[in-house]
Image (spheres, rainbow, N blue to C red):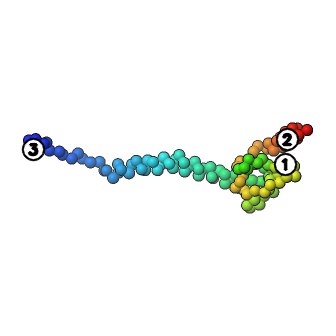
Amino acid sequence: MEFFISNAYAAPADDPAMAGLLFPVAILLAFYFLFIRPQQKRAKEHKNLVSSLNRGAEVVTNGGLLGKVVDLDENFVRIEVSENTFVQIQRNAIASLMPKGTYKNTLKKIKQQNQ
């Protein structure tokens, strides 16, 4: 039968188990560097922001309220959103710190528009 069909010899195989695991490991690494790591970095920055709050800081909440921190405790922050108007929110609801003077300038603009 060797006359019609030539013998097939197996090529030396690389490690097939490693080749089969290479693609899934590459996908996991891509997910880690594209999604998980940046999210952990943002969470760490937000935790530092929330822990560094102090009286007089001007903040924006997750809901978009701009205000000035009047009082704070371990879990809650009291924010002045307008003259003699206060809102009490959880610390984690603070989205970002604003530069000093932002709140004061916004109040001036509102007063000028109302006159």
Q: Which mark is residue 2?
A: 3
Give the mark, 1 or 3, whose residue is nearer the N terminus: 3
> Element under label 2?
helix
Q: Which mark is residue 40?
A: none
**105 relative to 69, above or below:** above
Q: Which residue is mark 1?
A: 82
Q: Which residue is mark 2?
A: 110
Find residue 61 and report its horizontal and vertical position in percent: 73, 50
**How far separated are the C-alphas under marks 2 and 3?**
96 Å
Mark 2 vs 1: CB contact within 8 A: yes
Question: For the residue marked with disc 2, what is the amino acid?
Answer: Ile
Find residue 57 and report its horizontal and vertical position in percent: 78, 49
| Residue at image point 88% right, 40% down | 114
Question: Would residue 55 be visible to someone looking at this image?
Answer: no
Find residue 42 and report its horizontal and vertical position in percent: 62, 49
> Element under label 3?
loop
Question: For the residue marked with disc 1, what is the amino acid?
Answer: Ser
Mark 2 vs 3: CB contact within 8 A: no
Question: Would residue 25 be visible to someone looking at this image?
Answer: yes
| Residue at image point 35% right, 48% down | 19
